[in-house]
Image: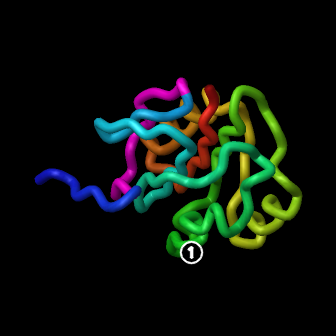
Amino acid sequence: MSERRHEGFLPGVHQIEGYGAGGFRFGGMSHRGSIIATPSGVQAIAAFRVEELDAQTLAPLFAEPAGAVQLVVLGTGGSLLLPPRALREVLRAAGMGVDPMATGHAVATYNILASEGRKVAAVLLASP
């Protein structure tokens, strides 16, 4: 049975197969721009810089059932940048830890944790 693809959303947990040139490969397809991967699926987000991340941008995280995500791996682009304090507090209040790192490291970390069945999500900012 093939998976159904919805507007900007690919259901299910998917390994991130590649990244670079401003985008990502996953689920046999590619996307230019940033993405969020949750236990429910992968979808595009409209953010390219850490400063653009807020609770509204990350709404797919908060739409997950309570306890479905315990750790958010945050790929911040070409280098490690801390997310805004307000965002860290909102995630903490929702019971989610956040681990920021360069996007390349975040892709690898997310793939490992997701393959182990951990309660993880990834917010991956595209980098050139």
Q: Position of residue 30 (x, y in %)?
A: 38, 36
* Kind of residue sitting beneath label 1: Ala
Q: Position of residue 84 (x, y in %)?
A: 85, 54
For the magenta stretch, what is the residue range?
9-21
Q: Residue at x 44, y 49 (%)?
A: 117
Depth order, front residue of 116/91:
91
Left/right placement of residue 4 relative to residue 88 reads: left
Question: How many numbered markers are drawn?
Answer: 1
Give the image quarter of residue 104: top right
Q: Position of residue 22 (x, y in %)?
A: 56, 31
Residue under pointer 1: 66
Give the image quarter of residue 115: top left
Q: Quadrant of the C terminus?
A: top right
Q: Residue at x 57, y 44 (%)?
A: 34
Magenta: main secondary structure equals strand
Instruction: Give yes or no for residue 88 being in the magenta stretch.
Output: no
Instruction: Give yes or no for residue 11 being in the magenta stretch.
Output: yes
Q: Residue at x 35, y 60 (%)?
A: 7
Depth order, front residue of 1/19:
19
Q: Residues within 10 Å of mark 1 (few under 14, many from 20)?
A: few
Give the image quarter of residue 124: top right
Q: Residue at x 60, y 68 (%)?
A: 59
Looking at the image, is 127 positioned above or below residue 62? above
**Secondary structure type for disc 1:** loop
Q: Position of residue 25 (x, y in %)?
A: 41, 33
